[in-house]
Amino acid sequence: MAAAAAAPGALGALSAGRVRLVAACCARLGSAAWARGTAPRRGYSSEVKTEDELRVRHLEEENRGIVVLGINRAYGKNSLSKNLLKMLSKAVDALKSDKKVRTIIIRSEVPGIFCAGADLKERAKMHSSEVGPFVSKIRAVINDIASSAKMGLVETKLAIIPGGGGTQRLPRAIGMSLAKELIFSARVLDGQEAKAVGLISHVLEQNQEGDAAYRKALDLAREFLPQGPVAMRVAKLAINQGMEVDLVTGLAIEEACYAQTISTKDRLEGLLAFKEKRPPRYKGE
């Protein structure tokens, strides 16, 4: 399965589990593209029902296999509440087991922001014994749907540290020295600054609809769809595991992952399609 994410703001290529993730994010969650410009304001009620905070939409026709998860918690700037976290976790678990799903796009339906981090108003009401498990749940969900750094890790301003994985992901993305600088200063980067340090790969001009990042995510998701599902899955595995070890071990991991593709029907279909000069018809087998 593949996955993707997008919102009015930024966009990124992320990976998770069996999910290939393209994410468009702004504010505090990292990404790969930043959409600049003022988006048209849309009307949002301050009394959104909790079941409407996450909307799941399966695309059809040429986009079949792409699922859009829309975060719609405007009154809380899309911050992660207990309810939203539960809904995200449940949705991702369900989609991971659905073989028809190839790509997930996680987008914000709130103009100008992707996610403001944890819901601090809700956090303030928690007993100290609840905070640790809640942060652990955030970390687990983030690990499941993303492997990118945040645009700004501002937790030290609140006398805490980035507990959702930021102290580990950010150094891996941009190096230890710069990661320490950003975490210690609680600095928030704009799109151009984030691109300059390697946090994101695209900077976009905002469109009139205010969804430039989502459109870019959708374009990337469409590029993912034709590829062999097994190959995509083991390629992601090789990259993720290889980044944690030395080069010699990484090459051994790559060799083991490559071996998993040799006996697949998809590999033979790819060779036959190349010979017959036609698009391959992969089945993930």
Image (cartoon, rainbow, N blue to C red):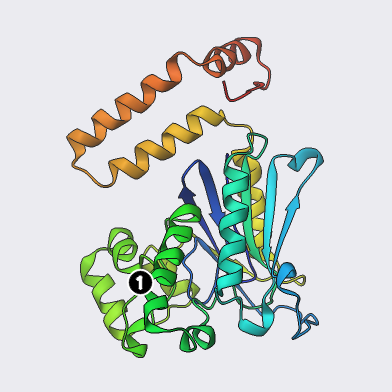
Q: Which residue is mark 1?
A: 163
213 lies above or below 96: below
Q: Secondary structure at mark 1?
A: loop
Percent coordinates x, y for residue 262 in the rendering: 43, 15
In this orientation, which residue lies closer to the viewer: 276 or 15?
15
- How many numbered circles are shown? 1
The image quadrant where one finds the N terminus is top right
Quarter-of-image position of residue 169: bottom left
Residue displayed at 37% across by 20% down = 259
Horizontal arrangement in the rendering, residue 127 relative to residue 83 (left or right):
left
Percent coordinates x, y for residue 125 in the rendering: 49, 88
In this orientation, which residue lies closer to the viewer: 253 or 193?
253
Residue displayed at 69% across by 70% down = 53
Task: Indicate the amino acid at tag 1.
Answer: Gly
The image quadrant where one finds the C terminus is top right
Horizontal arrangement in the rendering, residue 228 relative to residue 161 (left or right):
right
Percent coordinates x, y for residue 120 in the rendering: 49, 85
Quarter-of-image position of residue 72: bottom right
Residue displayed at 66% across by 60% down = 214
Percent coordinates x, y for residue 149 in the rendering: 40, 65
251 lies above or below 174: above
